[in-house]
Image (tube, rainbow, N blue to C red):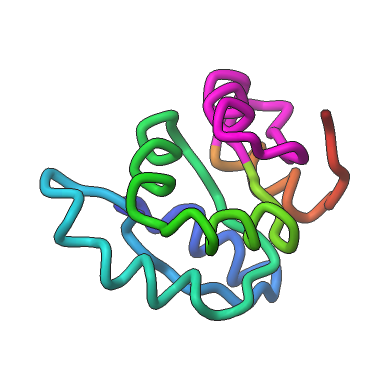
């Protein structure tokens, strides 16, 4: 993630995080870091744009993505990103009510699933 705001807020809330850039100018350059991050158990994955959703599902093998959909919370910064996740068949998305990093953190700390 380019901005440290989300990371700082989660650490302050005592969350254990793994910071991993999902995409940059050259998506393939980040595939190794992404695979390393998702191969460990995660309680949640944050998506801050539809592009991040597309790149994530492009780089993560389908069997692994299927398992993540069953066992991991998918957090979305807002409705456009939520729609992108649902197009990838993610059934349970936790979407920020305020479409900001603060709203995303609040949703994470709240822990309720919206459909």
Q: Is residue 45 above or below residue 43?
A: above
Q: Quadrant location of the N terminus?
A: bottom left
What quarter of the picture does the C terminus occupy? top right
Q: Is residue 71 above or below residue 25?
A: below
Left or right of 1? Residue 70 is: right
Q: Position of residue 33 (x, y in %)?
A: 30, 71
- What residue is at 70 percent from the left and 34 percent from the top? 95
Give the answer, above or below, for where 30 lies relative to 2: below
Query: Total marks drawn?
Result: 0
Does the stretch in magenta take in 83? Answer: yes
x and y, in percent, of residue 10 in the image = 61, 64
Splitting the image into 4 quarters, where does residue 82 fall? top right
Residue sticking out furthest to the front: 63
For this rendering, which residue is in front, 5 or 57? 57
Q: Is residue 15 above or below residue 86?
A: below
Residue in the picture at 55% in, 50% down:
46
Residue 45, how many percent across, how many down? 58, 56
Which residues are the magenta region?
A: 76-100
Which residue sits at x=51%, y=64%?
A: 8
Q: Would residue 11 appear left or right of 96 to someone viewing this image?
A: left
């Amino acid at each position: 993630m380019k901005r440290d705001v989300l990371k700082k807020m989660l650490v302050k809330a005592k969350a254990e995080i793994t910071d991993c850039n999902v995409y940059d100018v050259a998506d393939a350059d980040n595939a190794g870091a992404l695979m390393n991050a998702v191969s460990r158990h995660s309680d949640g994955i944050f998506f801050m744009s539809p592009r991040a959703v597309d790149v994530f599902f492009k780089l993560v093998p389908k069997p692994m993505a299927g398992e993540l959909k069953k066992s991991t919370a998918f957090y979305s910064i807002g409705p456009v990103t939520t729609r992108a996740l649902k197009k990838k068949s993610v059934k349970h998305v936790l979407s920020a009510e305020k479409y900001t990093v603060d709203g995303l953190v609040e949703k994470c700390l709240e822990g309720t699933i919206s459909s």
